[in-house]
Image: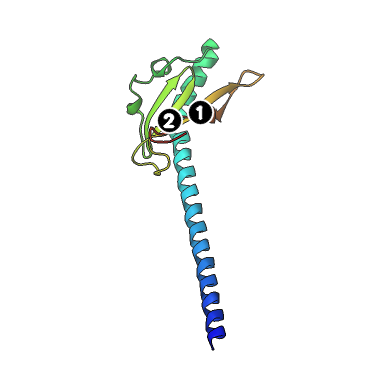
Amino acid sequence: MKAGFRLLHLAALLIAAVCFSAVAAAQSDDEEAAVAGDIEMAWIVSAAARAAIEEVWRNTRSFPADRTETGMSPTPSDTSFGPVAALDVTEGHVFVSFGGGAHPTLRGKTVVFSPRVKPEGSIEWVRNRSMEVPAADDDG
């Protein structure tokens, strides 16, 4: 009887572990989707700034130094929506900062979209992870 009970107990623990793993994986997928959604929102919010930067590039063959050279106000927090707390422009790079509406892993962080000039002169935009700014409380 004890061996049967132990086997049943072991099976119950195994089932519980599998269920816990499935729930944890689902939560992980949900978190990844939420983070990806916030980054997508940063991309959408930055559309006007990116278009203005491209226009400056087409007209001058140089990138705007700041927001005002793109026709935006000088205040980064003037461009905010949902998870995006502020948007700044520096030498053609678009810095999008996340605020309290963002997923907790993104709050206080900045995503950077950088222009790359293609050989024919058009611009493609890339997420520039090397320029991204971590939250102040991050270790690295």
Numbered tag placed on residue 96 in the rendering? 2
Q: Is residue 114 above or below residue 135?
A: above
Scheme of image coloration: rainbow
Under mark 2, the amino acid is: Val
Helix, strand or loop at disc 1? strand
Q: Are marks 1 and 2 in contact (CB under 8 Å)?
A: yes
- The residue labelled by disc 1 is 113
| Residue 10 screen position, x and y as percent | 54, 75
User: Label 1 vs label 2: CA separation?
Assistant: 8 Å
| Residue 29 screen position, x and y as percent | 51, 53
Asked if residue 59 shows in the view, the reply is yes
Residue farthest to the bottom?
1
Residue farthest to the front?
2
Q: Quadrant of the N terminus?
A: bottom right
- The reply, left or right, for residue 28 in relation to residue 86 is right
| Residue 96 screen position, x and y as percent | 43, 30
Q: Residue 89 lies in what quarter of the image?
A: top left
Under mark 1, the amino acid is: Phe
Asked if residue 128 shows in the view, the reply is no
At label 2, counting other C-alpha atoms closer than 10 Å, the crowd grade (few under 14, some 14-19, many 20 or more) is many
Q: Earlier in the sequence, mark 1 or mark 2?
A: 2
Residue farthest to the right?
119
